[in-house]
Amino acid sequence: MLRSICRMQRIVLGSSFALAIGVASTANAEEASSDLEIRAGITEALVLRCETSLSFGITRVDLENHDANAFVQVDPDGSVTSQGSSLSTGNGTNGVCTMSGSQAANEDSITVEFEGPSTQLEGKSNAFNGLDEPEKDIDLLVDEFSVKGKTVDENGSATINIGALLTIPKLDANAMGGYSGTIEVTVDDGFGG
């Protein structure tokens, strides 16, 4: 029996030694490397400049016959029309904004949006040469904005022509004078979105 115990001790001791050698030895680690390409794009920012005002010109109103809303329309091509027998329109001009710096492809469409569907004009002494600020402001509403020129050219630019409708309410002589206002125009060339 002593022999069996010694033999078992040798087997256990041999197994423990083999196990210790296996645990103590580690496999050699391998390394690999590669270059990571890194890119950054820098380009001119998309710019919009509105340098030609949308002007309805000077409209002459026959106060004796003007008793309801009348309208003056300036189209994006610059043509001026009016509705209302008490009006005589002057030389209106379409507004012009120029977009530059687009990375969109030639003839890609752009989106043109306005801050809101309408804006109110306020009496100003410097709105038109020769016209004073009105003694009493009236609600001159400009809405129904229309746009022509909504594609990018080969230089990444676009010329945007803008028209709109002016509503002239019932008024009196105290409302005569110059009026002006602004509306924010935003363009999106769809590039990178």
Image (spheres, grey):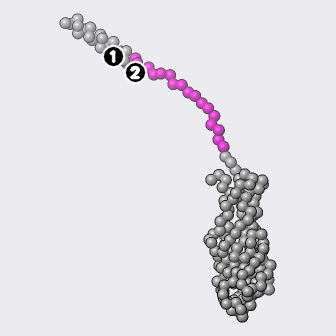
Q: Which mark is residue 23?
A: 2
Q: Position of residue 186 (x, y in %)?
A: 66, 64
Q: Quadrant of residue 145?
A: bottom right
Please name the amino acid that badge 1 sits on: Ser
CA distance for labels 2 and 1: 10 Å
Q: Earlier in the sequence, mark 2 or mark 1?
A: 1
Quarter holding residue 111: bottom right
**Tag shown at residue 92:** none
Q: Quadrant of residue 126?
A: bottom right
Q: Give, as a three-letter code, the residue at label 2.
A: Val
Image location of residue 127, percent across then percent down = 74, 81
Specify whether 148 is left or right of 29: right
Judge by depth and name the residue closer to the eye, 51 or 56.
Answer: 56
SS under mark 2: helix
Q: Residue shown at 73%/88% (left/top)? A: 86
Q: Residue at the spot x=72%, y=71% of the render?
A: 163
Circle 2: is it few (<14), some (14-19), or many (20+) Cα within 10 Å?
A: few
- How many marks are shown on the rendered structure? 2
Q: Is residue 24 magenta?
A: yes
Mark 2–mark 1 CB contact (< 8 Å): no
* Front in this rendered view, residue 3 or 81: 81
The answer to whether any part of residue 49 appears in the image is no
| 68 drawn magenta | no
Label 1 environment density (alpha carbons within 10 Å; few <14, some 14–19, many ≥20): few
Residue shown at 70%/57% (left/top)?
109
- Residue at x 31%, y 13% (from the top left corner): 13
Residue labelled with disc 1: 16
Identify the magenta region: 21-39
Q: Which quadrant holds the N terminus?
A: top left
